[in-house]
Image: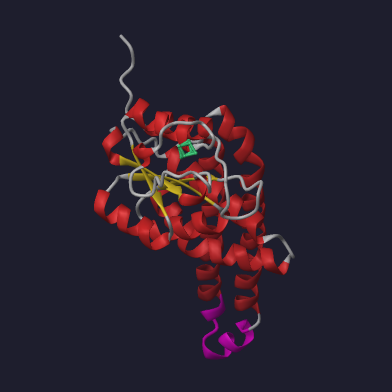
Amino acid sequence: MSNLQDQTAAPRKRLFIALMGFTCLMLVGLIFLAWWIPSKGLTNIHPDLPRYVGMIMAVLSGTAILGTVLLVLTTALGKDLFFTRFMRLMVIKFLLPVIEFVGKLLGLDRDRIRQSFIAMNNSLVISQKYRLRSDRILVLLPHCIQLFDCEIKVTGDINKCVLCGRCNVMGLVELGRKYGIDISVATGGTLARKVIVEKRPKLVLAVACERDLTSGIKDCYPLPVIGILNERPFGPCFNTLVNVQAIDEALQQILDIPKPV
Ligand code: SF4
């Protein structure tokens, strides 16, 4: 992972990892209780039954602990160790709702949990070391990235931008031209899904807020999505900003760029 992503994503990932560890401990505790409480009743059915049920519970606990350790190692090392695709499925479909629930119980801010989920998802995608042609990557932007009083509407075709430099669209158009990448501006989740269906990319790099990125990553699975958070100095959905360099660095990690000879 690049330096920039390391600096910004590491603290966020740590929160997700801490919550995962906590959830794992709770799960192991619940598994133990589920075995221990009815074990006397099980003895009445068959004297060996508590032992067999205990073995099954031990395997389940071991799997939960191993899965957590593997996930931590994969994101810490940035390498596709084992079952990264499967782990992404587990994180997106099962762990996120549980962790959101645990976070709520602990009184944590929902957006902080979503930020940590996005950072964890990005780590897992990047650890798979994709090297894709530029025409297999789609960059999706929210329409609020465009200056609200710009007379040119770039929804539908970002290349209509006349590069005046008053908003981040200019830098993004230049990035698209530099790498020959398709960049679409979507006015909502429905349009974003339509663009993805039409363009059939192998990977999406999406810019949005915590809520939209989280739902987009979930909806798009198994399509890999790298999420980049926008900045909202004027409040939500209005003249938002994005770190163009962060997008450039993320693209360099997934693009099949020929090395100079
Ligand atoms: S860079 Fe200028 S022309 Fe392009 S979208 Fe932003 S305000 Fe409009």
Q: Residue furthest right?
A: 107
Q: Residue furthest front?
A: 151
* 43 within the magenta span: yes
In percent of the image, x 65 and y 75: which residue is there?
33
Out of 223 and 236, give the one closest to the viewer: 236
Out of 124 and 183, give the one closest to the viewer: 183
Measured as percent of width and height from the top left, residue 251 is found at 42, 33
* 138 within the magenta span: no
Measured as percent of width and height from the top left, residue 141 is found at 44, 47
Residue 172 lies in quadrant: top left
Q: Residue furthest top?
A: 261
Residue 26 lies in quadrant: bottom right
The region drawn magenta spans 38-50
User: In the picture, which quadrant includes the C terminus?
Assistant: top left
Please name the predominant secondary structure of the magenta segment in the image.
Answer: helix
Out of 50 and 252, give the one closest to the viewer: 252
Out of 245 and 11, give the one closest to the viewer: 245
Q: Is residue 234 above or below residue 133?
A: below
Measured as percent of width and height from the top left, residue 102 is found at 66, 66
In percent of the image, x 33 and y 35: which residue is there?
181
**Residue 83 visible (yes or no):** no
In percent of the image, x 66 and y 82: which residue is there?
37
User: Which scheme is used to colour this image of the protein?
Assistant: secondary structure
